[in-house]
Amino acid sequence: MLAVSGGIDSVVMTDLFFKSGFDFVLLHCNFQLRGDESFRDELFMASLQEKYNKELLVKQFDTKQYAEQHKISIQEAARALRYDWFAEVSGQRSTAGRQLFLATAHNADDNIETMLMFLFRGTGIQGLTGINAFDKERRIIRPLLFATRKQIEDYAEENDLNWVEDSSNITDKYTRNFFRHKIIPLTETHFPNAKHNLLETMQRLKEAAILYQQSIALHKKKLLEYKGNEIHIPILKLQQAKPLDTITWEIIKHYNFSAQQVSEIKKLLNADNSSYVQSSSHRIIKNRNWLIIAPKENEQAGNILIEENDTAVKFKNGCLELKKLSASSYQLTASNSTAQLDARLIQFPLLLRKWKQGDYFYPLGMQKKKKLSRFMIDQKLSATQKENIWVLEMNKKIIWVIGYRIDDRFKITPSTKEVLIIDQLVK
């Protein structure tokens, strides 16, 4: 599949594929952003279809509406729409013995511009390696990355190729064009070989990035313990890892955390129990001697934070409903599925988690602590029942073995003024 805009780069790419004897289909996106010019490009594609006698697929998008709906830039919207459609076509046409690849016409100058944009925005070593010639996961190839824009122009002229010009390439409205028309030409007045030097630098950085990723993989192997859909990191080991900022970033970036949150996560190492930092999809929770990366979707998580304003929290064993009542208006009930606690003694956030070896609490009515493992033996719980025991923890103290017994230290007394009631609703 050739992604063809009708511009000089994609036209040259199409001609090279044709002359090399490849079988291909032409894909063209009409983003409807340039009025009549957008439809002119679409009509031009028909001439390419006729010239090369290849199938042409055209897709029209309401790019502005998509950008407004998703609150993203026009460039981001166009990119998302384009690659989603390419993936859709690929999925429809791939067969068991035949995989499709998408070819885009990015060239060496595009690569330089991309690298510089990442550099000025702020990036790690991977962002300085430029565009990959082969994206294995999405099956995208970029066969023109070796060629400069000047070489492409020379080829088009020598082979008498026709193409269409995109008027948006002239304006500096878009960031890429600002680098293309301003930054790079100005740089070349002082460093005539700037482009060549940048391409060589990117190649060296690609090799350095390979060594970097190998080192990061070793650190992750030592630090990360995968438990279901959670990741557990021993704090002591993480504190000894060097360089800490870089290793932390490489761990958290896959869970929608930003580079700016690295400093917050480092503070968790010495923070109070149950402290946390969150992204759009995950939380990193301080739990005793561990940092736990857990999904925010409560029913999937094995470690769930409960905030003071939460009224209902879903977890694997059902749902906890929380409310507070005045002690004077509340009547104690005898139910293992309800925790009745002195609200004055409870500090949020609370941590809802599965029990583990070494846990202990002071069962209601007892003045001595008891290991939870011993408590379960006394309750004559089966192995399966033990596997499904959850506890509610506050500052390293278990306040409720859910469905069985609260901790005596947090019970209601004659001096209690407000009661925290937590009901377990079983699925």
Image (cartoon, helix red, strand yellow):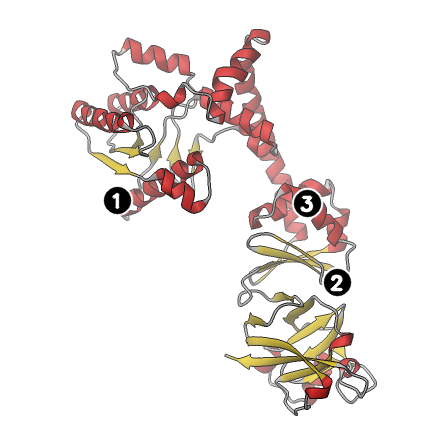
* Residue 411 in view here: yes
Amino acid bearing label 2: Asn
Amino acid bearing label 3: Val
Horizontal side, residue 69 vs residue 57: left or right: right
Residue placed under numbered mark 3 in the picture: 262
Label 2 crowd (10 A; few <14 / some 14-19 / many >=20): many
The alpha-carbon separation of the residues under discs 2 and 1 comes to: 53 Å
Q: Earlier in the sequence, mark 2 or mark 1?
A: 1
Q: Earlier in the sequence, mark 3 or mark 2?
A: 3
The alpha-carbon separation of the residues under discs 3 and 1 comes to: 43 Å
Q: Which of marks 3 and 1 is nearer the N terminus?
A: 1
Residue placed under numbered mark 2 in the picture: 273
**Proximity of marks 2 and 1: CB atoms separated by less than 8 Å:** no
In the picture, the disc for residue 93 is 1
**Residue in view at x 40 percent, y 21 percent:** 169
Secondary-structure class at tag 3: helix
Residue 89, horizontal then vertical, whole percent? 29, 43
